[in-house]
Image: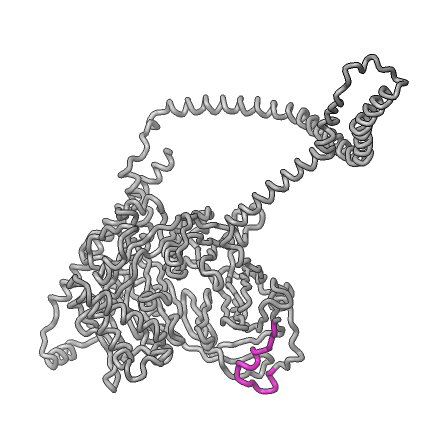
């Protein structure tokens, strides 16, 4: 039995009586029929900016009873109190009127994403031109049902300056802290901000360098796209997964926000694992790596050193600030795919997925770490980590630190370099402890490649979230709607549970389609959430561009039982068919159809022919014969008469049904005969058109300059590289040239503004000479860079013209 309480009014601070809404005045509606989404109050459809290549999401859920929706027109936040699974398990109730949360300072940019932290105290408002945090517990306003909330701008000096070309690629809350945010930007820097200290400057900065300086790699290999924090499994909780545009995945470990909270048992498990499998290893490299990890764990969590003093009674531990002074965290990767004894190279991966990577999703299912990569052609690449993640540092690369007045670490900045090493060839039957603590990035085990078959114009906008109740299911949100992907094979989870199940491909189902009919221009969603309750029910809630709300209940108990269900249905269908066939054949029993039983005449006397019928012996013999005849043939005739009389209505019904079926078939035959003439006409027309097309094709083949060979393998690979270069290298060169030109103008302007006497006095005070050599060298470098840019532009134009001519001729 479910008990519903209005906890929404009790969680928020008590407002003034003038602005509070009594519980008796609250009305409960189904969420999709709430007045906020009605046609009378609906705002006109607003086209959101999708330049960030991520689906917009204007909905957030605090995990309990509050739903937040951003209003694009009024630029305010609506808070709905909801009741899950009431009045029936398939519906959701929402209270009306809703609370309106107004920002203290007006939001001057267009919001495309909102996200709430773990304890529901702060909400992130993100857009392409701004980023701010709204604190949800504010003061009451004079307007009814309105709360004024404090807002603070985040990283405005870094990302949103006038002459700044840095774009935010992804931003999300850290799963183990209520005040830390992770941001990945286009300058290949991953930053962590702490809202409790300085909201304008990052607490940690990681400068990503996936390739060595001077190495010739394409621009897709150095352009990050997306990132995700790890889950609860072992070292995953201290890891950050970063995706680059060419589909390569890298890992940074360990990354810990200052003062974040972790479970004591999970930290103690890592500590014991490093002692057991690291220090006792025969490899010196494994011993060195485990020693660094143990020292990092002991300094970050001092309770590990003082376990005898009551540390075993702890449940939650807080991370203390600590960084190795002579080492920086390595950028582990790229992660390679593996199979039985063979490690796949990048060429094999490019052959399977040709589009550029646009989105990344991390999912933890049991003992398996699932990584999903969405590409621009609508394909999803599903991989599982084949080994455990371990922390790796680069020695000799000292980080830059910022200290507080009490000599505690307040900020960290380091360069994360990727060390180039030949990937080890792993086997599926190899022990996982043979490669532990050697500093090698974990390999990937390919699970499946799913093609969503999306339109070209909308395939690059793909977002992914996991089902909160069924982790094997992942929802994919795109411009055409919502699809669900369910994993039926988990290599390590099934192995640990002792299940010997065959490898099964994931099942893909369409949950919601936003394409009206056969329209080629779909209407994308402006919001999407996956909700669940403690009773095992799950829902998905969507917000359309026309401000309509969609609520769908998702099945959970039978999702993973598809094969068993299909086999059961097949068995039941077979039984029903056999029953029907048996029933139709047993209208008259087999006993009657086989005829009367054979009569065995009694042995007759040798003088039977001389006996007359009037004699005593003759009468007894005739009486015996009549008795046998009556027992067999007369009783059989009675049974046949009874059966025919009893089954006559059923036989008549069957005969009438067969007559009606015969009549329908005759009508269908008449329709086929009438359509056959039309089909013959259409076939004749098609044959004529085919012959004319063949004649035109022969005439076109005779034209000069059209006998061209198909593209070779090298040409196809070059074309794939050119497709990936589109919009990457030129943008990087343009942004670098504009930044350098802006710095040069600023420097020359400062030189012209100062008088010669001031410059000489300043130089005399500094004791330095005029840096004419440096200015000349900078100018020469700018000239060389402009020449290189012009040459690259010419080459790109030549390649584009060649491709256009090739497409025209083809």
Q: Quadrant of the N terminus?
A: bottom right
Q: Position of residue 27 (x, y in %)?
A: 66, 74
- Residue 744 can be seen in this image: no
Relative to the observer, which residue lies in front, 292 or 333?
A: 292
Give the magenta range.
2-20
Q: Residue at x 33, y 50 (%)?
A: 726
x and y, in percent, of residue 702 in the image:
37, 22
Q: Quadrant of the C terminus?
A: top left
Outermost residue on the right side: it is 614
Is residue 450 part of the magenta span, yes or no?
A: no
Q: Is residue 400 left or right of residue 454?
A: left
Furthest-top residue in view?
610
Residue drawn 61% across the image and 25% down it = 679
Out of 191 and 603, give the one closest to the viewer. 603
Check if residue 15 falls in the magenta segment.
yes
The residue that appears at 51% across and 69% down in the rendered structure is 70
Q: Residue at x 52, y 76 (%)?
A: 101
Q: Position of residue 371 (x, y in %)?
A: 37, 57
């Amino acid at each position: 039995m479910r008990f519903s309480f209005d906890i929404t009014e009790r969680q928020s601070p008590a407002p003034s009586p003038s602005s509070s809404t009594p519980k008796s005045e609250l009305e409960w509606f189904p969420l999709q029929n709430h007045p906020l989404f009605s046609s009378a109050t609906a705002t006109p459809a607003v086209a959101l900016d999708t330049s960030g290549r991520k689906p917009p999401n204007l909905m957030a859920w605090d995990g309990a009873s509050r739903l937040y929706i951003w209003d694009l027109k009024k630029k305010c936040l609506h808070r709905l109190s909801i009741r899950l699974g009431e009045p029936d398990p398939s519906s959701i109730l929402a209270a009306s009127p809703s609370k309106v949360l107004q920002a203290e300072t007006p939001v001057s940019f267009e919001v495309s994403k909102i996200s709430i932290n773990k304890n529901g105290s702060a909400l992130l408002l993100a857009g392409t031109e701004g980023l701010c945090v709204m604190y949800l517990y504010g003061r009451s306003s004079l307007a009814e049902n309105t709360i004024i909330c404090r807002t603070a701008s985040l990283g405005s000096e870094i990302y949103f300056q006038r002459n700044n070309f840095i774009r935010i690629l992804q931003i999300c809350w850290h799963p183990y802290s209520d005040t830390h945010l992770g941001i990945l930007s286009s300058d290949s820097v991953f930053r962590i901000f702490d809202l409790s200290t300085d909201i304008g400057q990052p607490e940690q900065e990681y400068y990503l360098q996936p390739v060595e300086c001077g190495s010739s790699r394409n621009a897709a290999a150095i352009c990050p796209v997306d990132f995700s924090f790890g889950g609860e499994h072992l070292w995953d909780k201290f890891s950050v997964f970063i995706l680059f545009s060419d589909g390569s995945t890298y890992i940074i470990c360990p990354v810990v926000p200052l003062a974040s909270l972790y479970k004591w048992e999970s930290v103690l498990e890592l500590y014991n694992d490093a002692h057991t499998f690291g220090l006792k290893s025969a490899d010196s490299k494994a011993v060195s790596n485990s020693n660094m990890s143990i020292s990092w764990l002991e300094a970050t969590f001092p309770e590990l050193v003082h376990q005898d003093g009551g540390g075993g009674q702890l449940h939650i531990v807080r991370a203390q600030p600590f960084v190795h002074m002579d080492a920086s965290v390595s950028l582990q990767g790229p992660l390679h795919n593996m199979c039985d004894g063979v490690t796949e190279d990048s060429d094999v991966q490019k052959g399977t997925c040709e589009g550029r990577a646009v989105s990344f999703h991390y999912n933890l299912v049991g003992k398996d770490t699932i990584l999903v990569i969405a590409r621009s052609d609508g394909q999803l690449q599903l991989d599982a980590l084949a080994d455990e993640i371990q922390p790796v540092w680069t020695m000799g690369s000292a980080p830059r630190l910022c200290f507080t007045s009490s000599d505690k670490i307040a900020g960290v900045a380091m360069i994360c370099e990727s060390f180039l090493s030949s990937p080890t060839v792993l086997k599926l039957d190899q022990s996982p402890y043979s490669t532990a603590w050697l500093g090698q990035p974990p390999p990937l085990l390919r699970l499946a490649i799913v093609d969503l078959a999306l339109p070209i114009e909308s395939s690059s906008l793909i977002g992914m979230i996991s089902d909160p109740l069924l982790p094997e299911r992942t929802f994919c949100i795109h411009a055409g709607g919502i699809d669900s992907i369910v994993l039926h094979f988990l290599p390590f989870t099934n192995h640990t549970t002792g299940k010997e199940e065959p490898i099964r491909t994931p099942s893909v189902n369409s949950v919601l389609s936003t394409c009206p009919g056969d329209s080629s221009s779909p209407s994308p969603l402006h919001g999407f959430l996956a909700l669940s309750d403690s009773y095992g029910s799950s829902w998905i809630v969507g917000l359309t561009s026309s401000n309509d709300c969609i609520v769908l209940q998702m099945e959970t108990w039978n999702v993973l039982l598809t094969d068993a269900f299909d086999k059961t249905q097949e068995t039941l269908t077979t039984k029903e068919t056999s029953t029907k066939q048996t029933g139709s054949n047993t209208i008259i029993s087999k006993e009657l159809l086989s005829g009367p039983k054979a009569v065995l005449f009694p042995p007759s006397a040798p003088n039977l022919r001389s006996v007359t019928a009037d004699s005593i012996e003759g009468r007894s013999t005739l009486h015996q014969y009549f008795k046998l005849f009556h027992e067999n043939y007369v009783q059989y005739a009675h049974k046949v008469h009874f059966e025919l009389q009893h089954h006559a209505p059923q036989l008549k019904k069957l005969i009438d049904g067969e007559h009606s079926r015969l009549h329908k078939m005759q009508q269908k035959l008449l329709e086929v005969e009438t359509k056959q003439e039309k089909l013959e006409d259409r076939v004749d027309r098609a044959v004529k058109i085919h012959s004319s097309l063949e004649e035109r094709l022969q005439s076109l083949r005779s034209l000069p300059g059209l006998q061209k060979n198909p593209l070779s393998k090298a040409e196809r690979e070059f074309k794939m590289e050119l497709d990936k270069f589109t919009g990457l290298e030129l943008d990087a060169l343009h942004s670098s040239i504009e930044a350098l030109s802006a710095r040069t103008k600023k420097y020359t302007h400062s030189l012209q503004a100062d008088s010669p006497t001031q410059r000489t006095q300043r130089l005399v005070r500094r004791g330095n000479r005029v840096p004419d050599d440096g200015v000349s060298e900078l100018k020469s470098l700018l000239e060389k860079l402009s020449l290189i840019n012009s040459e690259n532009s010419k080459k790109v134009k030549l390649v584009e013209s060649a491709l256009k001519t090739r497409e025209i001729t083809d």
